[in-house]
């Protein structure tokens, strides 16, 4: 049995945080109906959309018209969870606020994903991932000390919020099974980022209210040390030939000196303590780079991490990850798709002995209409065709 088998989720969501949340639940066996607006023209599914909406049933429905509203009510009445991440107030204006839904489905778990909490002064504002990262405290920590802050290279607030919200929904589903009661769940991008910046807040208080510094690739927290950086290696890719080395202790540094054949660095007064190594890190980095330049990033990692136990990792690009034999079949799965060809999709990074996650490409726009409207709601095919002609579906 799948962990969330028997749980039905209506997901009216766009962009990334909402679709990613429901995708996690779909990977774990929930029946997810992904609701989209009907369009006048065929919608092209791009890889990004497929990656976020796999394992779901794609429905189309116009919830602004009476017939569409009634169909949405029928779906919600059969659901355990209703999840939305439209602009603030959008679903309330269509008549589907938590208060209204609860009147008809008292045990519903209603989930709203927004940029900011609705009771905050920015509650009516629209936000995307970089806004959440900035407002939650992450962007101020990214970049180099003598430069402006930098945005993160991935949608960390969208993806982080999806993980946190999916976990909360699962707990609410469990609580509902125990008590029979639903609830309202609100999650926001800014709050999510603040929650995952806990180390920065620890440093803020330990420094007596002084903000953490931006530190680029070096060690970021209370007691800076070195070597702790990204180092260039051999290779033909102009952007992809690097290794990360993180030596936080004297023992790490000793092993590194042995690995690169530079025990003489242990007797150099400039590098005798973590503090001095940080102060003189440019000189130390230059010496380490002489060694890393003689190896490609995988050879360097084999020696440093594999043979000497030094915290070090090759800097992998998405292309490198897709070619990693260990990752393919575990966190990455080959997913055939007639529109974009076979591609490798990341799933959730958890192994369960009772359930193997199988990624399935998402369908075309409205691909699940007949199965759900006819098979679940009992509509006839003629009724479905008539509603499609009126652009309700």
Image (cartoon, rainbow, N blue to C red):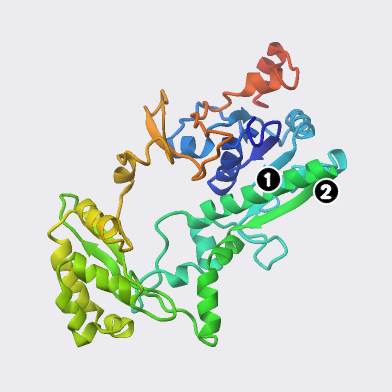
- Residue 87 visible here: no
Q: Which residue is mark 1?
A: 170
Say which of marks 2 and 1 sits in front. 1
Q: Is residue 377 above or below residue 282?
A: above
- Residue nearest the observer in this picture, 245 or 306: 306
Residue 29, visible in the rendered structure: yes
Residues packed near mark 1 inside 10 Å, few (<14), some (14 to 19) or many (20 plus): some
| 246 shown above or below 153 | below
Depth check, front residue: 186 or 39: 186
Tell me the element at label 1. helix
Residue 356 vertical position relative to residue 216 in the rendered view, above or below: above
Residue 354: which numbered mark, if any? none
Residue 315 in which image quadrant? bottom left
Sequence-wise, which precedes: disc 2 or disc 1?
2
**Residue 151 pos. (x, y %):** 42, 63
- Residue that label 2 marks: 99
Relative image position of residue 8 (x, y in whole percent): 70, 34
- The quadrant of the image that shows the C terminus is top right
Residue at image position (50%, 79%) is 203
């Amino acid at each position: 049995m799948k962990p969330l088998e028997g749980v039905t989720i209506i997901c009216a969501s766009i962009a990334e945080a909402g679709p990613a949340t429901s995708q996690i639940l779909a990977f774990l066996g929930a029946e997810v109906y992904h609701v989209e607006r009907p369009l006048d023209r065929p919608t092209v599914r791009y890889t990004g959309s497929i990656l976020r909406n796999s394992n779901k049933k794609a429905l189309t429905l116009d919830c602004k018209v009476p017939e569409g509203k009634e169909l949405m009510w029928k779906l919600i009445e059969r659901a355990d969870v209703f999840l939305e991440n439209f602009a603030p107030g959008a679903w309330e204006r269509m008549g589907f606020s938590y208060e209204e839904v609860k009147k008809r489905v008292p045990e519903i778990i209603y989930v709203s994903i927004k940029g900011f909490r609705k009771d905050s002064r920015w509650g009516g504002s629209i936000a995307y991932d970089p806004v959440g990262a900035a407002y939650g405290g992450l962007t101020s920590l990214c970049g180099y000390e003598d430069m402006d802050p930098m945005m993160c290279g991935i949608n960390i607030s969208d993806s982080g919020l999806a993980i946190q919200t999916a976990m909360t929904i699962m707990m609410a589903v469990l609580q509902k099974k125990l008590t029979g009661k639903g609830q309202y769940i609100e999650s926001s991008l800014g709050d999510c980022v603040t929650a995952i910046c806990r180390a920065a807040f620890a440093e803020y208080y330990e420094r007596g209210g002084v903000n953490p510094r931006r530190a680029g690739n070096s060690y970021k927290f209370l007691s800076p040390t070195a070597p702790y950086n990204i180092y260039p290696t051999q290779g033909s890719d102009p952007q992809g030939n690097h290794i990360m080395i993180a030596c936080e202790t004297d023992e790490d540094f000793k092993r590194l000196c042995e690995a690169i054949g530079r025990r003489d660095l242990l007797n150099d007064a400039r590098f005798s303590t973590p503090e001095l190594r940080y102060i003189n890190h440019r000189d130390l980095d230059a010496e380490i780079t002489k060694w890393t330049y003689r190896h490609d990033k995988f050879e360097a990692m084999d020696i440093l991490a594999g043979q000497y136990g030094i915290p070090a990792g090759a800097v992998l690009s998405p292309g490198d990850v897709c070619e990693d034999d260990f990752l393919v079949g575990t966190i990455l799965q080959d997913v055939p798709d007639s529109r974009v060809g076979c591609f490798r999709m990341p799933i959730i990074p958890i192994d369960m002995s009772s359930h193997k996650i199988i990624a399935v490409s998402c369908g075309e726009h409205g691909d699940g209409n007949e199965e759900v409207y006819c098979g679940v709601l009992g509509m006839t095919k003629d009724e479905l065709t008539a509603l499609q002609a009126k652009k309700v579906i």
